[in-house]
Image (tube, helix red, strand yellow):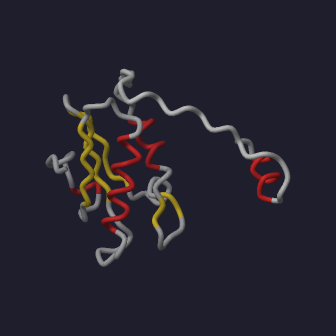
């Protein structure tokens, strides 16, 4: 739906958008290619830090993206070790990446606290 259409609908004008037919459950799904690091970072730009009100990429909270044979591993940090939204941010990051990944690819998001310069790459896979 376009922005104009959404505004018209919000203000009481215009018909609701037509619903697309859901794919049949037995229809084969097309597999996606493995994304690039830039595509992973673009997907992570949809994940907001609720306290800062900005996405985790622009905040510099994405420390690393590493591709393995079976998927992608991402290291992020939080603005504070006491952040109550850590679990939510990790879940949203994993879901955002999973949407652009091949169907059976693994997505692991790990929260780290070491500054990026003190580490030598992604350390481990964790679901």
Q: Hey, which quadrant is residue 31 in on the image?
A: top left
Q: Residue at x 17, y 50 (%)?
A: 126
Q: In this view, which residue lies farthest toward the bottom?
A: 82
Q: Quadrant where the N terminus lies? A: top right
Q: Is residue 72 above or below residue 13?
A: above
- Residue 71's image quarter? top left
Residue 39 position in % (x across, y down): 44, 36
Residue 35 vertical placement versus 4 (above, below): above
- Position in image of residue 103 (x %, y %): 31, 31
- Tell me residue 47's x, y (percent): 46, 55
Q: Position of residue 9 (x, y in %)?
A: 78, 53
At horizontal 27% and vertical 54% (from top left) the residue drawn is 117
In the depicted view, which residue is nearer to us: 13 or 56?
13
Q: Residue at x 83, y 47 (%)?
A: 14
Residue at image position (44%, 48%) is: 44
- On screen, residue 41 versus residue 54, left or right, reads left
**Front residue of this view, candidates 11 and 33:** 11
| Left or right of residue 67: residue 10 | right
- In the depicted structure, whether residue 69 falls above or below residue 49: above
């Amino acid at each position: 739906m376009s922005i104009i259409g959404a505004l018209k609908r919000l203000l009481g004008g215009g018909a609701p958008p037509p619903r697309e037919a859901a794919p049949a459950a037995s229809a084969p799904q097309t597999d996606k290619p493995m994304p690039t690091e830039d595509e992973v970072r673009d997907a992570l730009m949809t994940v907001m830090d609720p306290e800062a009100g900005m996405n985790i990429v622009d905040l510099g909270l994405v420390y690393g993206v590493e591709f393995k044979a079976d998927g992608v591993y991402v290291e992020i940090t939080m603005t504070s070790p006491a952040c109550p939204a850590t679990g939510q941010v990790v879940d949203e990051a994993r879901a955002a990446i999973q949407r652009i990944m091949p169907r059976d690819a693994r997505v692991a998001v790990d929260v780290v606290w070491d500054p990026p310069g003190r580490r030598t790459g992604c350390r481990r896979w964790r679901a």
